[in-house]
Image: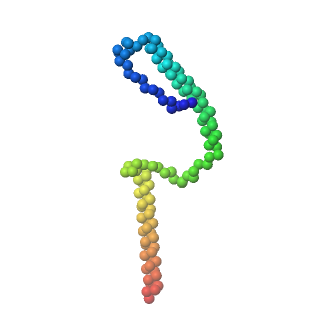
Amino acid sequence: MAANKKISPRRAKTATGLAQESPRARSKSLASSSQNLNDQIHRLECFIAAAPGVARQQKLSRVNFVPPMESDTPVYRRRPGARLPMQQQIANRQRRIRLLAELGIVGIGIAGLAGWLSQYWGR
């Protein structure tokens, strides 16, 4: 089944060229183009009839195929410079707020520890 069969382009014929063409040549060209169309139709019908078998064979060939490991979160690709969806903007903002709060708590803890240690060693 040659699916990519090259089809020769039809030449544009002028009215004088059609008038000068003999009926025998005209019928011969129509017969050849008709045969070409019938071959294409037959090829496509065979391709359509074989499609379920090909799909079944492809499915069987993928039975022992192990898909790649998936990450916990799906990775979405977007164009560079494109605006993030609102849901992602909200999630990013909440993540930054949580990181800032964590930084504040850690900073206060370090300052408190330093103050407590300076009281102990400062005497």
Residue at figure coordinates x 60%, y 35% from the top left: 55
Residue at figure coordinates x 53%, y 21% from the top left: 38
| Residue 113: percent from left, percent from top | 46, 77
Left or right: 39 in relation to 111: right
Q: Nearer the viewer, residue 94 or 10?
A: 10
Left or right: 57 in relation to 5: right
Q: Nearer the viewer, residue 69 or 55?
A: 55
Which residue sits furthest bottom?
123
Q: Measured along the vertical axis of the image, is residue 65 above or below residue 37?
A: below
| Residue 47: percent from left, percent from top | 57, 29
Determine the image quadrant of residue 102. bottom left
Left or right: 64 in relation to 77: right
| Residue 51: percent from left, percent from top | 58, 32
- How many numbered circles does the render carry? 0
* Quarter of the image that includes the N terminus: top right
| Residue 61: percent from left, percent from top | 63, 41
* Quarter of the image that includes the C terminus: bottom left
